[in-house]
Image: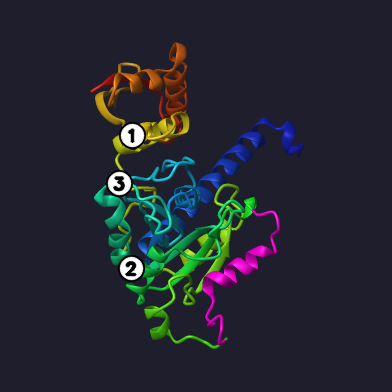
Amino acid sequence: MELRPLGKSLGAMWCYCVLRESKSRIASAARFCAQACRVLGPKRSLKVAFISVPNAGKSTLINRLIGQKVFAVSPKIHTTQRRALGVFTVDDTQVTVLDTPGVPSAWGPKLKLGETFMKDPYRSMLEAQLVLVMVDVSDNNKRRESLDPNIVRLLKHNTHLPSALVLNKVDLVRMKHQLLSVAADLTRTFHPEQERVIGREELEKGDDKCWPFFQEVFMISALTGDGVEKLKSFLVSSASTGEWEYDVDTVTDQPDQLLVEDIIREKLFLHLDKEIPYVITQDTVVWEENHEGVLVIHKHLNCRSSMQVSIVIGAGGRIIQSIVAEAKEDIECLLQRPVDLTLVARFK
């Protein structure tokens, strides 16, 4: 019997390919079984309430935690206008993050806000097992060394909940050593004059500028991802035994129609000034799949005046064309399918 190198034997090559394919299938089956054991075995879960004043970066961080852009983000305050859930699953642990409108700042402008802006953060605290308080510590935030009094009041009314402090936008801090001073100010347990430890009962009645009962302090940049993995590991390790509320592939409780509405609102915030994006409402005229498998979306943007219609359209239609192009790209990325998007601005 003649022995030939494997590479020169057609029969041996066929056997090798069969063996390699078998090994691949065995490896796939092993991965499937391992995942099934994690899913079918004991499960762990955690519900987290994110609270902050507007524009601290909650939605950006939640998008980073769940691994894709789901929630609208813009530089303007109150881009998030209702409560929504973000979900991520790691092995046997599922973490549900409650994204709410920013708590209206005690220092900020007195805006006419809907009921959801005032009540959603409070409702989220009732459901949560852990609270994350996020603070914008960028150099542009002149009040970064004090917690907003409304945030502290929320914590005082929920002292049974463990909490952690998240210092966001560290990429916008030039002198990094200042972060330690900021963290100390936000978590101090010493009376500034008497330099003694303040008791929990005394603090709950008094100081509205700090909270010394945070379990952990994290310094992150939700935009760049710096420090986010450490925070994510903390959330996973904080979970306790409990059933999952969502499938392993679920990333949010929001239906596609609302997610698309949020994406379009985000683009309105990015392209329009002043109060205009806040007052525009949307009506869905068409939402259907055509014969080519393309999702056709036709929406009306309802403006309060003909002047607003002109502003939304822009000179030569450039503004609304930019809004459509950018929204279409994000919608296709989110839904993982081709989309034909039409937006019509009208006075209603």
**Which residue is at a point 47% across and 22% down the rendered structure image?**
322
Residue range in magenta is: 173-194
Q: Is residue 129 visible?
A: no
Q: CA distance from mark 3 to mark 1?
A: 22 Å
For mark 1, what is the residue? 261
Q: Are marks 3 and 1 in contact (CB under 8 Å)?
A: no
Is disc 3 placed on a helix, strand or loop? loop
For mark 2, what is the residue? 242
Outermost top residue: 316
Q: Residues within 10 Å of mark 3 (few under 14, many from 20)?
A: few
20 left or right of 302 in image: right
Is disc 1 placed on a helix, strand or loop? helix
* Vertical side of 1 occupied by 347: above or below: above
Quadrant of the snapshot with the C terminus: top left
In the image, 134 versus 2, the foreground residue is 134
Residue 39 image-quadrant placement: bottom left
In the image, 253 versus 343, the foreground residue is 343
Question: What is the three-letter code of the residue carrying label 1?
Answer: Glu
* Vertical side of 187 occupied by 314: above or below: above
Q: CA distance from mark 3 to mark 2?
A: 40 Å
Q: Residues within 10 Å of mark 1 (few under 14, many from 20)?
A: some
* Vertical side of 333 occupied by 190: above or below: below
Check residue 73 for magenta coloring: no
**Residue 197 image point, x, y percent:** 52, 87
**Residue 93 image point, x, y percent:** 42, 62
In the image, 31 versus 7, the foreground residue is 31
**Residue 20 image point, x, y percent:** 60, 42
Q: Residues within 10 Å of mark 2 (few under 14, many from 20)?
A: few
Q: CA distance from mark 2 to mark 1?
A: 33 Å
